[in-house]
Amino acid sequence: MTSEMNRALVALSIVLLTSSAGRGAGTGEPPSGEPPSGEPRSERLHYRWRLEGLSGVISRLLRLLPTTGDAWMELRVEPYGRLEVAFTATSEQAREGDFWKYETLVDLGSWRSVKATETLHFRKKKKNESWNLEELAVIDVLGGLQLLRFSPPAEAERRTIWSDEKLYPVTVSSDGLERRLLGSREVTVRHVAIRGIREPNQRRWKGQADIWLTDDEAAVPLEILYSQSLGRLRMTLVDTPASSP
C-alpha cells in the first residue's frame, strides 16, 4: 500500500478517536442520560473494507491503490488493567504476505496510551515504527475507538485526534438511533459523527467520519465510513463478534 493508502487505513482508526484527556476516563459511573456503556473484553472483529468515490474509480482503472480487502480488529484484556488492541488490514490486490498493522497498548485506569506501533509490508516497502506515548498523557486513534465505544458522548463534545504525531480538534456527536442488520437479525445502532473544526493556531482535520455502533454494552462497530473530498473508505463488519476465551 502506498503512503496514501496507509493514511487512508490509519483513518479507519482515526474515525475511532477520542480526546487526549477523555471525558469520563477512569472516573467510574457516567452521568445519567448517557448511552449504554460497558467494559472492554477480549474479542476479534472481521471487516471488509472498500475504497469508494472518485479515488476508488481511478484506483480501479489505473491500479494505483488497493481498493478492497479484509481487516481485523483484535482486543485482548491484559493483566494490571491494560488493553492491547491490534488492527490489521490486507488487500486482494496486494501480494501474499503484504499487510498493514497498527497496535496500541492502553492503560484502562487512565484511558491513556502507553505505546503505539505501526508495521507496513507492501511490495518492496517495509516500515516498522513505534511511539512511546506514556509521557504525553494522550490516547491514540485506535485506543480512542475503544473509549468512544465504552464511554460514548451523550451530546456534542469537542475532542482531539492524535494521528501521525499531530493533534486535530474535532466535534464528536451522537446523531440518533437507526436500525441495521447484524448477521441475519436487525439491531438498533447508534450513529456517531466526527467532524473537524476551525480553531486559532490549530491544524484542521479535513476528513469526516461516521460510525454505527450497536446500542448495547458491547457497542460493536458495525460500519465505519471515512470521507474526504475525492473519496470514501468504508469498513463493514462481516462476522458476528464473539468473545475470546
Image (cartoon, rainbow, N blue to C red):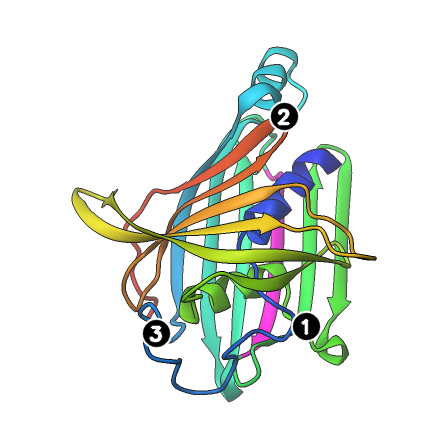
Of marks 2 and 1, which one's residue comes earlier in the chain? 1
Of marks 3 and 1, which one's residue comes earlier in the chain? 3
In this image, 149 relative to 54: left or right? Answer: left
Cα separation between marks 2 and 1: 30 Å
Amino acid type at mark 2 = Leu
* Residue 91 higher or lower than 59, as above or below: below
Q: Where residue 58 appears, x then y in whole percent? A: 62, 15
Of marks 3 and 2, which one's residue comes earlier in the chain? 3
Give the residue at mark 3: 38
Q: Where residue 39 appears, x then y in whole percent? A: 38, 76
Q: What element carries label 2?
A: loop
Q: Going 56% across and 59% down the picture, which residue do you hit?
A: 17
Q: Going 42% across and 66% down the picture, which residue do you hit?
A: 152
Q: Going 40% across and 67% down the picture, which residue do you hit?
A: 154
Instruction: Specify the farthest residue to the right.
Output: 201
Give the residue at mark 1: 138
Cα separation between marks 3 and 2: 36 Å
Q: Where residue 240 appears, x then y in whole percent? A: 27, 51
